[in-house]
Amino acid sequence: MIIPSHIHTICASKYYSVEEMKQLFQKGISNFGENRTDILINKYSALKELPITWHFIGHLQRNKAKDVIPIIDYLHTLDSLKLAENIQKYRQTPLQCFIQVNATQEPQKYGVSLHDVTSFYQAVKKYDKIHIVGLMSMGKLDDLNETRKAFKTIKTLSNTLSLPFVSMGMTDDYEIAIEEGTTHLRLGRYFKQFLEG
């Protein structure tokens, strides 16, 4: 499936070295997402001469927040008021944030529960260093039917809250995410094609 031009694609760069990221940037890819704080910090330092848009797409531990929050452009995994307080503390300008929602209701996954999303959204709106731009969720591993239901739920909830963006869809389920109205895809192996030839 061809990804429509209006959808933002984020390269999940844990799959790529600094040199490969430079090559991808030269091919026109400028949005990179990391899910580990130490790797993000190292790559940010190595690539700081490039105008990259940095996304943090993993679970952000509060004790690592002070090192990551000042250098990223988007946080896809805001899921607690404690983390919101850390953003308020360590951020100079408003950070673009997605609220992470556990749409598949799996106990091992991070994210705000479905029935708490609206109240959580209202609670974090008081922080002037947080700008909520949308909701983020992950599908269910090896279950595309449940994944589609989760994505449909997130899109509906995002519309209800009048949020412009939804971050959903990874390499194995991005086609479903596109069909269900995602605005941001977090893709890893997909970008290998840009390094070939």
Image (tube, rainbow, N blue to C red):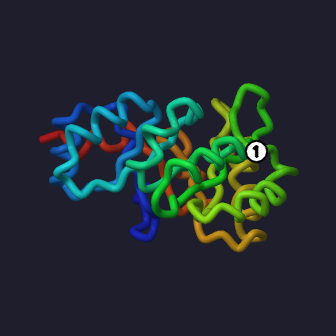
Residue 118's place in the image compared with 15, above or below, is below
Query: Along the line of sight, which residue is nearer the eye, 33 or 75?
Result: 75
Residue underneath mark 1: 112
Q: Is residue 9 left or right of residue 153?
A: left
Q: At x 53% / y 63%, what residue is drawn?
A: 183
Q: Is residue 110 left or right of residue 88?
A: right
For the C terminus, the quadrant is top left
For the N terminus, the quadrant is bottom left
Q: Quadrant of residue 135?
A: bottom right
Picture coordinates of residue 76 (x, y %)?
A: 55, 49
Query: Along the line of sight, which residue is nearer the eye, 104 or 162?
Result: 162
Q: Is residue 85 left or right of residue 173?
A: right
The answer to whether residue 25 is seen in the rendering is yes
Picture coordinates of residue 22 (x, y %)?
A: 17, 44
Q: At x 24% / y 39%, what residue is drawn?
A: 45
Q: At x 53% / y 52%, what residue is drawn?
A: 175
Picture coordinates of residue 188 (x, y %)?
A: 39, 39
Picture coordinates of residue 123 (x, y %)?
A: 77, 58
Q: At x 64% / y 31%, what residue is drawn?
A: 141
